[in-house]
Image (cartoon, rainbow, N blue to C red):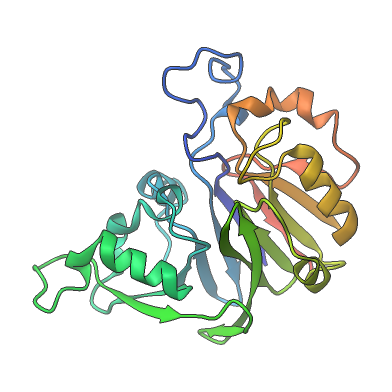
Amino acid sequence: MILKFLGTGTSTGVPQIGCNCEVCTSTDPREKRLRASALVETRGRRLLIDCGPDFRQQILGVGSPALTALLLTHSHYDHVGGIDDMRPYCHPEPFPVYCLPDVAQDLRDRVPYCFAKHLYPGVPTFRIHEIAADRDFDVDGLTVTPLPVMHARLPIIGFKIGNLAYITDCSKMPPETAAAISGIDTLVLNALRHQPHMSHMNLREALDVISVVKPRQAFLTHLSHDMGLIDNTKKLLPQGVDIAIDGLTVAISD
């Protein structure tokens, strides 16, 4: 299995518009972060996790490969804002999307022209598969396990695919979710900044979760400019934990 990080930034991206901090003005390409998204390649399938407003740039950057399905963690704009740009993948058949029922409803409200009775020629079309947070589901022969977490007061999900767990926008991980991924090969987890935040884990909270789950390797994603320069933050990380950067490719053991 191969994991490609298409974007590793928070909702504003990095650099943040109008900011002159040392991170946003850095010339280090590792400090440039598009909105969080990932591509998982396994057994001849390619699963896109989230489709934010940078999707077009991200998918062109990896050669516009064929995609099997889109998995959505939740419906905040930085995770679904690029949905219209998926139109090349939506013909001749509607493109499959797997998400919770509330996310499905938000999509229908956000881009109603994609679900209209009489479709305008050329609009993207989607086949929505509503999933349950407590039940595995099948994507073209692949078993995917939803991983329930809290994003402030909003219940959202991450995904377990084989020996990978991908979780973003988590502020609190239920013990049951931590137990479900205990000892996994690769854990991707959000860590927004050093200071506490109402709807995201900070660095300390993310490291505490990683110490409980004990993956072979862990990568921090959904970073803001408030995390500081990457080289300074790396010095604070234990062995086996690293900061994800845009474009990073990771091999995952079976």
Give coordinates of residue 157: x percent, y percent.
59, 66
Q: Residue at x 71, y 30 (%)?
A: 195
Q: Quadrant of the C terminus?
A: bottom right
Residue 45 in sight:
yes
Residue at the image point whose x is 48% and y is 17% from the top = 19
**Image location of residue 126, percent across then percent down:** 30, 73
The residue depicted at 79 percent of the width and 69 percent of the height is 181
**From the viewer's perspective, is 233 left or right of 70?**
right
From the viewer's perspective, tell me whether residue 64 is left or right of residue 156: left
Instruction: Please name whichever residue, 143 or 250, is drawn nearer the observer in this view of the structure.
Output: 143
- Residue lying at the far front of the rendered structure: 153
The quarter holding residue 38 reads: bottom right
Total number of numbered discs in the rendering:
0
Which quarter of the picture shows residue 150? bottom right
Give the percent coordinates (x, y) of residue 99: 47, 72
Q: Residue at 75%, 58% (x, y): give it.
A: 187
Name the one closer to the observer, 103 or 56.
103
Vertical placement of residue 72 versus 31, above or below: below
| Residue 22 spot, x, y in % from top left | 61, 14
In the rendered image, the vertical position of residue 212 relative to residue 28, given as above or below: below
State which quadrant residue 120 falls in.
Answer: bottom left
In the image, 108 versus 27, the foreground residue is: 108
Left or right side of 142 for 187: right
- Asked if residue 67 can be seen in this view, the reply is no
